Amino acid sequence: MKKERIVILDGNSLMNRAYYAIRVLTNSEGINTNAILGFSNMLFKIKDDFKPDSIVCTFDRKAPTFRHKEYDAYKAGRKKMPPELYEQFPILKDMLTMMSINIFEIDGFEADDIIGTLSKYASNKGIEVFIVTGDKDALQLAEKDVNVIITKKGISEIEIYNEERMIEEFGVTPKEFIDVKGLMGDKSDNIPGVPGIGEKTAFNLIKEYKSVENVLDNIENLKGKKLKENLLEYREQAIFSKKLATIVCDVPVDIDLEDIRSNDKYDVEGLRKLFFRLQFKRLLDKLPAEEKIMDKKQVEFKKVESLEDLENINKDIEDILYFNYDEENLYLNIKDNVYLINVNEMIQENQERFINILKNIFENKDINIVVHDLKKFISIMKKIEINIKNQTFDTMIAAYLIDPSRTNYNLKDLIEQNLFIDLEGNENIIAAETYYLKELYLNLKENLDKMELKNLFYNVEMPLVKVLSSMEGLGFNINKEELDRLSVKFREDIEKNKKIIYEIAGEEFNISSPKQLSVILFEKLDLPVIKKTKTGASTNAEVLDKLLDKHPIIEKIIYYRQLTKLYSTYVEGLRTVIAEDGKIHTNFNQAKTTTGRLSSTEPNLQNIPIKYEMGRAIRKVFIPDNENCVLLSADYSQIELRVLAHIAKDDNFITAFNEHDDIHTKTASEVFNVEIDEVTPLLRGRAKAVNFGIVYGIGDFSLAKDLKISKKEAKLYIDTYFERYPKVKIYLDEVINKTKEDGYVTTILKRRRYIPEINSSNKIVKALGERLAMNTPIQGSAADIIKIAMINVYNRLNEESLKSTLILQVHDELILNVYKDELEKVKEIVKYEM
């Protein structure tokens, strides 16, 4: 008959092993999860491999134990637990509770002592025991039916010891292993042992004499003068060390065997929610399959067969319509019934009638609509001349505001992770998504409210969707002839520059090959190696920058790289994305950046270069729509510095802006203690670097590097800056402290960004977190300001029935295609609204 089995987990030891074995992982909330994941994987593997009847877990408490009270230096010097690990323990304990795994912890005793007590109790009851730990101290607990599982290589491998294996491998019994520790001590626990006695000597002595006491009784029989002297001098310390190393097996802890045996009472729903929250999707398969909780419901949907049926269905639409779409179909959720409408079939039946039905829905201001990725849907509807006029709720944008750090906002993932519903196995996933869209909407709506994001969502992000859709549709007109001319010019310049490099090098080689370039620079020209990589000496941009004054070839190589990049990315790159209308239609990403800034892709029109004459020439290919138009550019002046002055409430800073001073000249005058008219271009340039450096949390090292000055001088600049603008320093310190406490930072309009890096034990990661905390409220607020300006400009142009249009946003700049006869009016609108 199979014996009953119990597994006893050493919680602290296993979490510590998992934390250091697995790279840093965080979920979308910024919660560290690597230790929990490693522990969970190990736990499920132990369950699968050993099939225990019950599992318990022990933990250390913060309170000092009897060992600390008897020996002040016990465990002294041990590295403090990183906060990234510490924060994972409460979550792990919640998980264990949901798995009905009893937790044992008690003040005054270590987890080891509780393990020893539980082990002895269980073995006395005839239960086979498996202790899982990363700490070899537990080997002393091994017996015939008490197995100690030691985790190795982090937690990926294990070794199993019972009494027989202990004797076979170490030559001592488990109990004698305590005596070995008494002689050799334990550095990790700061147990002193006997000086001069290492592991090998300790094992040899105990193998022969069986105990510390017997060794001490036989000192005269031992070889080695120093060994004898140390044993005599540290006799009491050896006995005391053995006491410290001995695991107590009679801790006063209540043990209810029937309660311990209840591991099959899983809170499956609670665990599913936890695993979804932690983003441990693979662990979901480890849970018991309970259909009513797993909710793998097959969502039924009905295909609409005729326009008449569609008209009848539309009569059931109430205040809110939840809908979804793909390339061919439209999905409506009306009163929790999902209808599939094949667009092509409806158009073939009667296009005009079908469009009128859609207009009755999507141009009806009395119907609110909920959809995922509204911008894309607006663009689709525009093709059939339907202009969305409903009040709208975009679940993608809502999810982005709630958690801007996600890598994607896929609707299926959002439903699964927010509602804890498994959509796999449905005949039509999009129909299933449509069915659960209402629940997702209610979930996101509630979170927007809790996080004070309603104003930002309804008054900024949602109105902006229509603005961006308009800008994408309008596109930017391109002078293709100029682009063709530039293509020829670039190729000529690249060849010309290539020949100059060959002449300087004295031979031809592949300039774009880091390996070949490395040979020329560091072997032939004997330039100093700045940085080495696995493949040899680095030739990256940073290295070339440091070599700039060492040889004339470096400047030419840097220029060559710039030219080839400009040519491939912008000259040839732009040619491939010109649409049939002669324009480039970029895609504005509203749910991409963690700061709230918009980004532009396919192609990126926010990064057209201005460095070098050839870079500026590329901008000339962007032209107005026709000869009756001009391009109007409106750019905020030092918007981020103005936001900083506002948030910090610094009087000197605010006064400088209100008096329309050149802020960099004013800062130079303040920092370098010179009169305004004595500020040189060099001093103004340095003040500008300090001004913008402060916004981005720059340190003296980085400022020194940027300005090519000493670290001491850079520190003086920063210190003087904070003396002149003291409230800026106060604000930056406050925002760092608040972010450490909250785990996130907010903009003026409550846009939130989680910054888990700020509580990292790694100094470099922590410094990054502090810089993000300082910069995000400034950059994020600036992003919100330009978005509001875009909405207001767009609305005014429409309200006043102007032909001029907003066509591009580049960070702090708006670009409009303006009809010449409307120019003065548009300039007035843009200036006022911005």
Image (cartoon, rainbow, N blue to C red):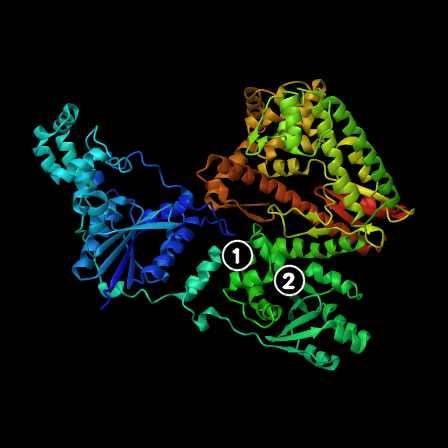
Left or right: where does residue 277 sit relative to residue 645? left
For image coordinates 67% across by 34% down, the residue present is 513
Left or right: where does residue 688 sit relative to residue 762? right
Q: Secondary structure at mark 2?
A: loop
- Mark 2 against mark 1, which lies toward the viewer? 2
Q: CA distance from mark 2 to mark 1?
A: 21 Å
Left or right: where does residue 381 sit relative to residue 780? right
Q: Amino acid at mark 1?
A: Lys
Q: Give the position of the C terminus as an image quadrant.
A: top right
- In percent of width and height, residue 363 lies at 75, 68
Residue 166 visible? The answer is: yes
Q: Secondary structure at mark 1?
A: helix
Q: Give the position of the N terminus as an image quadrant.
A: bottom left
For image coordinates 75% across by 63% down, the residue present is 380
Crowding at dot 2, Cα within 10 Å, few <14 / some 14-19 / many 20+, comes out as many
Q: Quadrant of residue 718?
A: top right
Crowding at dot 1, Cα within 10 Å, few <14 / some 14-19 / many 20+, comes out as few
Question: What residue is disc 1 on?
Answer: 450
The tag on residue 372 is 2
For image coordinates 56% across by 40% down, the residue present is 772
Q: Quadrant of residue 510?
A: top right
- In percent of width and height, residue 497 lies at 78, 28
Q: Amino acid at mark 2?
A: His
Mark closest to the chain's N terminus, 2 or 1: 2
Q: Nearer the viewer, residue 617 or 552?
A: 552
Q: Nearer the viewer, residue 447 or 696?
A: 696
